[in-house]
Image: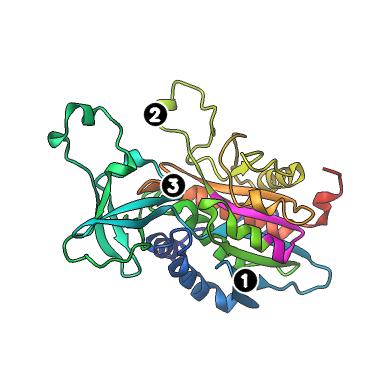
Amino acid sequence: MPINCKKQTLPTIEKEQIDLLARLSNASGVSGDEAEVRKIIREEITPFADSVETDVMGNLIAQKNAKGKCALHVLIAAHMDEVGFMLVDKDSEGIYRFSLIGGIDERSLAGKQVLIGKDHLPGVIGACPVHLSTKEERECILKLESLRIDAGPGCTDLQLGSYAVFATRFQAFGPSLIGKALDNRLGVATLIELLKHCPEHIHLTAAFTVQEEIGARGAAAVAYNHKPDLAFILDSTPAMDQPSYDNAENTQYRTRLGFGPAIYAMDSNTLYDHRMVEFLKTTATENGIPYQIRQPGGGGTDAGAVHLSQDGIPTATISVPGRYAHTAVMIARKSDWENTLRLLTASLDSVSQDIFKNER
């Protein structure tokens, strides 16, 4: 049941939202080939938006107009794309060399199932079996050059340049959400809900961006073309809370499952506007929403491109923590997703130019 808070009744994650997340997670959307994800989003948001368009880059951009004049223009961006693969050469019958799209740990690939192309043809990432390997080979870390995608003898005419994704199917059980591409389909699902329930005092540009995993390329075009007053970026961030960290301080991210949305102070591309950070922290506290500060350090989000656009855009990033990012499966907590949605809902309800009454 929704809870009553200082500002308004905050939303909850129900079966409807989880079913949508499952569809988004299971869809194929490698950077540069986001059409399947974009179609699902368009179907969901069109009845709730004043306009919906796809720009030259492939970003899906929805506008929700304010009711009054001189409204604050808020951009919220969530990237649609996921890490994956591209077929680059044919070795033999149904066996293909491939390249990585986005940051993927090569050590995790052997034996993983994939889906190839728009028809989702099945394949397996193969490597030499351990009992047939030499001692020297067993002692070496598997490299991309020694891996192949095996689609079987019936798939001899796959086009080079075809994309492939992990074949993992979404599951929700107990407190956990498990699936591929939860980085960043969790953010996408959150933005869909925010658009559906947008407050009337702001003008919202909801941008479902492309090619974030290879350099926040779509977000750069969105920020330049729409020039909002401020921006919120929705993403997922690694949770560094596995058992190996129990006896040592986590100095990389300090982000943990079950502790709420992660608010960024700094990453490798952005020093965040402290006024935006304080606004999110204050909003969370006033509404009883748990949150955590992501350890300042590496990584990056669409904020890296957005905050530098034109003469600068005040920007904040809020992420849902997850384990095992950029592998065949991520695990996240429903409560963290729900509290991320609540924090953004409460923030949009109260956001105003007063955030910037003090100089940065």
For label 1, count other residues whose C-alpha is less than 10 Å away and answer few (under 14), some (14-19) or many (20+).
many
Real-space Cα distance between discs 3 and 1? 27 Å
Q: Report the amino acid beneath label 2.
A: Pro
Mark linked to residue 62 = 1
81 is higher (above) or lower (below) than 262: below
Q: Which residue lies furthest to the left in this view?
A: 131
Q: Report the amino acid beneath label 1.
A: Ala
Real-space Cα distance between discs 2 and 3? 16 Å
Residue sitting nearer the eye, 278 or 54: 54
Q: Does the magenta stretch include residue 81?
A: no
Helix, strand or loop at mark 1: strand
Q: Which colour scheme is used?
A: rainbow
> Would you say 342 lies left or right of 138 here?
right
Question: Which of disc 1 and disc 3 is earlier in sequence?
Answer: 1
Residue sitting nearer the eye, 229 or 197: 229
Q: Quadrant of residue 121?
A: bottom left
Question: Closer to the observer: label 3 or label 1?
Answer: 1
Real-space Cα distance between discs 1 and 2? 42 Å
Question: Which of disc 3 and disc 2 is earlier in sequence?
Answer: 2
Residue sitting nearer the eye, 63 or 160: 160
Residue stretch rendered in magenta on the structure: 223-235
Q: Residue at horizontal 25%, vertical 61%? A: 122
Location of residue 160 in the rendering, given as x and y in whole percent from the top left corner: 34, 62
Question: Which of disc 2 and disc 1 is earlier in sequence?
Answer: 1
Residue under pointer 2? 243
Question: Closer to the observer: label 1 or label 2?
Answer: 1
> Would you say 313 lies left or right of 171 here?
right
Mark linked to residue 332 = 3
Q: In which quarter of the image is residue 242?
A: top left
